[in-house]
Image: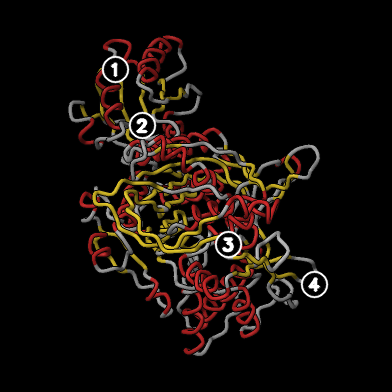
Amino acid sequence: MSVDRENLESVLKRRFFYAPAFDLYGGVSGLYDYGPPGCALQANIVDIWRKHFVLEEDMLEVDCTMLTPYEVLKTSGHVDKFADWMCRDPATGEIFRVDHLVEEVLESRLKGDKEARGLAAEPDKSEEKKRKKKVKEIKVVKLDDQVVAEIESILAQIDGYSGPELGDLMKKYNITNPATGGPLSEPLEFNLMFETAIGPSGQLKGYLRPETAQGQFLNFNKLLESNNQKMPFASASIGKSFRNEISPRSGLLRVREFLMAEIEHFVDPLDKSHPRFAEVAHIKLRLLNKTVQQEGKTDITEISIGEAVSSGLVDNETLGYFLARIYLFLIRIGIKPDRLRFRQHMANEMAHYAADCWDAELQTSYGWIECVGCADRSAYDLTVHSNRTNEKLVVRQTRETPLVTEDYEVDFDKKKFGPKFKKDGKKIEQYLTSRSQDELEILATELEEKLKISVNVDGVDAPVEIEKELITISRKTKLDHIREFTPNVVEPSFGIGRILYSLMEHSFYIRDGSESRAVLSFPPLVAPTKVLLVPISNDDKFTPFLRKISAALRRLGISSKVDDSSATIGRRYARNDELGTPFGITVDFETLTDESITLRERDSTKQVRGSIEEVVKAVQSMVAVEPVSWEEGTVKLTPFTSEAEE
């Protein structure tokens, strides 16, 4: 399905869904402000997200600070690894994000090949506009069939290439500055976090958070206590995150400040089943698995999530359960099922600690866009923060049957050990007690044979020699009544802005027979305004009825807006169709006599008539959390024919 992006963006900006931030000063790339309809649309999406996940799954919501100290993000790996690859044009100073550049240039060559073969579709204006900025022109050149196959394979795997591999592709396909043809530098890593200083001294280095997850991990013990020490459980957080994008583009799809909604579902690593999996096992998803991508293809497999988990395609029930719940959420807010797929991360793009990872991708005029990531992050985050702070982030459960263990333990002769090592004693003691069983076995053998051990301890002059009279390392049999483990984490992460923009594309169409009548067909559940109130004229005698209807809707929490301008009713309807308003109520001369009013549905333009109470009740049923259809909601109302649409 093609979308007239230029027309859509014109509507969105004219009706102030969003606009470039600081527009009066020329704007700043990658920063946007949401206007009233955009703000309401986003708020409605977030509200449904909370009901669908936080309320339905009994999650623990937290709101954590956006300022994060350096040490936290150093430990999590963001300081070293949260980067994209960029290259620079030495002549112009222009900077490109390498994977996007390679993708756009190779896509343009495929389009040129199709034109040369006479297979190209009629280009739309928005594509021409985009091309002027990025690729300048598409050269109509027929490529060898082998080269076409190579490029198609590369594009299918574009998310999995490393920086050096992208550099090799640039050389192989002679990719230069698309606008000037000038040579580009080798790819360089660029950390995407915004750096700042916390406090007046500037000595406490920090960053604006690149995700909301770390606050949830650091509060794990408090969350576990809030859940009465019961497992499994999930936390959730909604808030702004920041990424210093190399080359922001595609409007709301790649920005520097954005709203995220993230879930951390903590689960026993030995039992990743989900108690409610059977409820969703029948749901069919469109899956693009890693094996298909590695073969350079993009073939979709449509199977039930139950089959995907039982076959091992999706790693476990909990991960599969959330993939299905993500699907249900996206469909509920108006995403088109045939423009939604789940793409599995390939081995070379997945984090080393992840067990499995899938992205919910939505098809837009910009291509397939990742909008939700869902990963089994194993126990990585809790483990690294625990190791760094020496604070246990674990679950303790009483065993039904005590576990008999025989482990090496270190005993210290405190009277001799302390005086011998003085201020270094604690560091040496901590070093020895933190060794693995294999390491302790080696040290025990060394102590028995040499009557001393020699170890290297951070912060202490090495090597440290410890005589046998100071310590004992021996195996001891214990009855372990408590099982202690670090939970694994399944993390669904939602980019609200990307979902919002994709929804606007999926909802946009031009009404048949009129190129100027644009419609945003948002489901009533997410529409910024639910009801347009329209008096047949701006005569004061209609005002009491408008107030009565407005008050009745307001009491039910249903947003409405009055349009009593001098424009025709058809024109007023059309203006609000652009805003996605699903229903219109007309107050006319008949209302003055019997208090009946007309209710119009946006997409079909059908109209029905009834009393104020009947119409308000019908609207309430169609904008509810579990809404009914137009046919069901208006079954007791009388069909009405009007020429107002003309």
Residue kind at label 2, given as amino acid type: Phe
The residue lying at 70 percent from left, 73 percent from top is 177
Sequence-wise first label, 1 or 4: 4
Crowding around mark 3 (Cα neighbors within 10 Å: few <14, some 14 to 19, many 20+) is few
The residue lying at 68 percent from left, 73 percent from top is 187
How far apart, in angstroms, are the residues tagged by discs 4 and 2? 56 Å
User: Residue 395 or 247: which is nearer the viewer?
Assistant: 395
Residue kind at label 3, given as amino acid type: Glu
User: Residue 326 or 340: which is nearer the viewer?
Assistant: 326
Instruction: Please report contact status of discs 3 and 4: CB closer than 8 Å, yes or no.
Output: no
Indicate the position of residue 601 as horizontal and vertical percent values: 32, 35
Residue of label 1: 612
Which corner quadrant holds the N terminus?
bottom left
The residue lying at 30 percent from left, 53 percent from top is 321
Residue kind at label 1, given as amino acid type: Ile
Element marked by disc 3: loop
Sequence-wise first label, 1 or 2: 2
Residue of label 2: 583
Left or right: 568, with 384 as reference point: left
Instruction: Please report contact status of discs 4 and 2: CB closer than 8 Å, yes or no.
Output: no
Q: Quadrant of residue 593?
A: top left
Residue of label 4: 90
Instruction: Please report contact status of discs 1 and 3: CB closer than 8 Å, yes or no.
Output: no
Residue of label 3: 469
Sequence-wise first label, 3 or 4: 4
Crowding around mark 4 (Cα neighbors within 10 Å: few <14, some 14 to 19, many 20+) is few
Sequence-wise first label, 2 or 3: 3
Indicate the position of residue 76 as horizontal and vertical percent values: 57, 55
How far apart, in angstroms, are the residues tagged by discs 2 and 3? 86 Å
User: Residue 175 or 306: which is nearer the viewer?
Assistant: 306
Instruction: Please report contact status of discs 1 and 2: CB closer than 8 Å, yes or no.
Output: no
Sequence-wise first label, 4 or 2: 4
